[in-house]
Image (cartoon, rainbow, N blue to C red):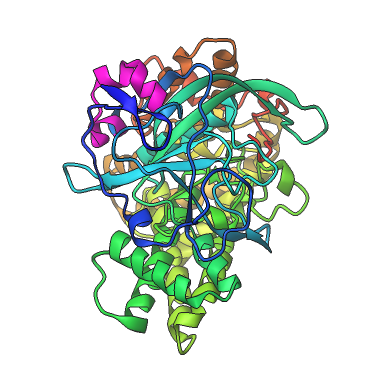
């Protein structure tokens, strides 16, 4: 069933399980101006804007888990109407599209108003289980916050976001999700490495899904503008909608909320560090108030262990967002959020308490990660030192992080040998040169396991639950992108299927668990990426 909506886009009815209530646009002030004209938006959290239709929307992939959660059945997903809605050419009844207004610190510097430059929220509501979900199209056209950009997304970046959103969920790391990947049939011009070689690429749109897309930057913008009334209104709304379990009022409630934001952020970053994920662009406008991984741009996965590595070409010199700095950058970002919230407090002590809660939570989670990755019941000070020693030799030896920790679970403590992790070494000469250091570490590790006295099968079970076999390595994503660019989209679903069970050995899928091949060391998209990626 279809017809003309009041917005001007066609309206189509799709079977789904959501009850749209669009609480954000109902409760918070909106921009009185409509449309995509670029502008500074004062005193408003959102601006009404419609997706811009595309030439030929076609569904390329979808997440079965998210479809089920949202109540879309397979027949609906396969229908042309589904591609129309999630390609931006039509709306379902009950939607209220908008782009959100926020600011942020980018690479440590205040950037002023930023906003959803290429994201348009279709609407929000609850499903049959009472879960709240917001549907957002990324790459659906210009918004008031697009500045000089076109609001579109290319196929390569959309595939990367679609795959990684779902992979992170199955890895057990808090994240936004992805419902669908739709090809647009339009070309999008991009300069991938900002080197003056712009070229047309296939366009695509991801429908990403989360209980909320509110970011630290939402609170920073009214603070920077001195709009304390809007700041308070936004905080009250966020707590009521997204943290309904919190009770109290005034500063006490705000303090409890900020502390939970801090601990949720610690949980997210600890998850990144456990699996070797590098976000690449940890600006405050890319930090979720719910502690969800958000905005998958120039992210990367650590192949050979290197705490100083960043995948972002824009950050190649300063490496502010390098792998090993992610915990401290999250703390810095929380400090900016605390500053933004300070007008709501008579004293800074509650905000400092929240920052201290982040530090304590992260330290505890880091120890839990160390214990799990090494197969220990718990990690003491000596175990932290043992892991630090291992990190040093892994970096010096150019050793694959994922393969090493997964292989270490199979170590025979009666005859310990590096052979169990032989496939993790990128350079055999380095293995030989550092043989004494590796052997010394193995001896210390085995002694620690023997002192623990736990059966080997329990140790292996614990390690295999913490150390994934399959992660969405950049080169795997690039192979999928190359195939899709040539018209073969089947590999998207194939890789997604493997990544749905990252901790389970999957017979026949060994090729998805191999270290980065030599050809991928310098290939575009396989090592360094730009913010257009």
Quadrant where the C terminus is found in the figure: top right
Q: Residue furthest left?
A: 128
Q: Residue 72: say if magenta.
A: yes
Instruction: Specify the segment rendered in magenta.
Output: 66-85
Please tell me which residue is depicted at 72% across the width and 48% down the height of the picture.
Answer: 315
Residue occupying image coordinates x 54% and y 69%:
222
**What main secondary structure does the magenta stretch of the protein show?**
helix
Q: Residue at x 71, y 38 (%)?
A: 433
Q: Residue at x 64, y 29 (%)?
A: 526
Residue 365 shown left or right of residue 205 in the figure: left
Q: Image height check: is 452 above or below 485?
A: below
Q: Is residue 6 visible?
A: yes
Residue 338: x and y in percent read 51, 74
Asked if residue 270 is positioned above or below residue 172 in the image, the reply reads below
Measuring from the top left, give residue 101's x and y in whole percent. Answer: 52, 56
Residue 310 % position (x, y): 66, 45
Which quarter of the figure is the N terminus placed in?
top left
Q: Is residue 413 visible?
A: no
Does the magenta portion include 394?
no
Camera-nearest residue between 509 and 251: 251
Residue 92: name its quadrant. Answer: top left
């Amino acid at each position: 069933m279809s017809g003309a909506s009041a917005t001007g886009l066609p309206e189509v009815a799709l079977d789904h399980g959501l009850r749209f209530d669009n609480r954000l646009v109902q409760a918070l002030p909106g921009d009185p101006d409509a449309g995509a004209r670029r502008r500074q938006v004062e005193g408003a959290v959102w601006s009404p804007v419609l997706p811009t239709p595309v030439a030929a929307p076609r569904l390329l992939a979808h997440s079965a888990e998210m479809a089920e959660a949202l109540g879309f059945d397979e027949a609906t997903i396969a229908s042309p109407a589904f591609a129309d809605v999630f390609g931006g050419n039509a709306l379902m009844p009950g939607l209220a599209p908008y782009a959100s207004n926020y600011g942020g610190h980018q690479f440590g510097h205040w950037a002023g108003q930023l906003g959803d430059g290429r994201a348009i929220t279709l609407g929000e509501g609850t499903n049959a289980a009472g879960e709240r979900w917001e549907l957002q199209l990324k790459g659906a056209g210009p918004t008031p916050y697009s500045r000089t950009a076109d609001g579109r997304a290319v196929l390569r970046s959309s595939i990367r976001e679609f795959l990684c959103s779902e992979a992170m969920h199955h890895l057990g790391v808090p994240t936004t999700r992805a419902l669908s990947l739709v090809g647009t049939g339009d070309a999008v011009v991009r300069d991938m490495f900002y080197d003056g070689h712009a070229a047309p690429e296939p366009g695509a749109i991801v429908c990403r899904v989360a209980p909320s897309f509110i970011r630290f930057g939402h609170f920073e913008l009214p603070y920077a503008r001195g709009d304390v009334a809007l700041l308070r209104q936004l905080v009250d709304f966020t707590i009521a909608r997204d943290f309904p379990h919190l009770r109290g009022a005034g500063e006490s409630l705000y303090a409890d909320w900020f502390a939970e934001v801090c601990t949720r952020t610690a949980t997210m970053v600890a998850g990144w560090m456990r699996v070797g994920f590098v976000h690449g662009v940890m600006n405050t406008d890319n930090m979720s108030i719910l502690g969800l991984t958000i905005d998958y741009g120039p992210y990367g996965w650590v192949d050979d262990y290197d705490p100083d590595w960043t995948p972002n070409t824009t950050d190649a010199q300063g490496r502010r967002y390098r792998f090993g700095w992610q915990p401290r950058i999250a703390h810095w970002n929380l400090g900016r959020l605390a500053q933004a919230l300070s007008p709501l407090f008579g004293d800074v002590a509650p905000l400092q308490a929240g920052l201290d809660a982040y530090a304590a939570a992260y330290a505890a989670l880091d120890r839990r990660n160390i214990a799990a990755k090494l197969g220990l019941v718990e990690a003491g000070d000596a175990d932290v030192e043992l892991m630090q020693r291992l990190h040093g030799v892994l970096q010096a030896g150019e050793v694959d992080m994922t393969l090493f920790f997964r292989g270490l679970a199979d170590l025979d403590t009666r005859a310990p040998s590096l052979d169990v992790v032989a496939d993790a070494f990128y350079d055999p000469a380095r293995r030989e040169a550092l043989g004494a250091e590796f052997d010394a570490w193995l001896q210390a590790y085995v002694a620690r396991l023997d002192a623990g006295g736990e059966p080997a099968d329990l140790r292996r079970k614990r390690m295999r639950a913490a150390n994934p076999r399959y992660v969405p390595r950049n080169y795997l994503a690039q192979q999928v992108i190359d195939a899709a660019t040539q018209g073969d989209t089947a590999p998207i679903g194939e890789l997604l299927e493997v990544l749905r069970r990252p901790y389970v050995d999957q017979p026949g899928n060994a090729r998805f668990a191999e270290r980065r091949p030599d050809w991928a060391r310098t290939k575009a998209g396989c090592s360094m990426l730009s913010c257009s990626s």
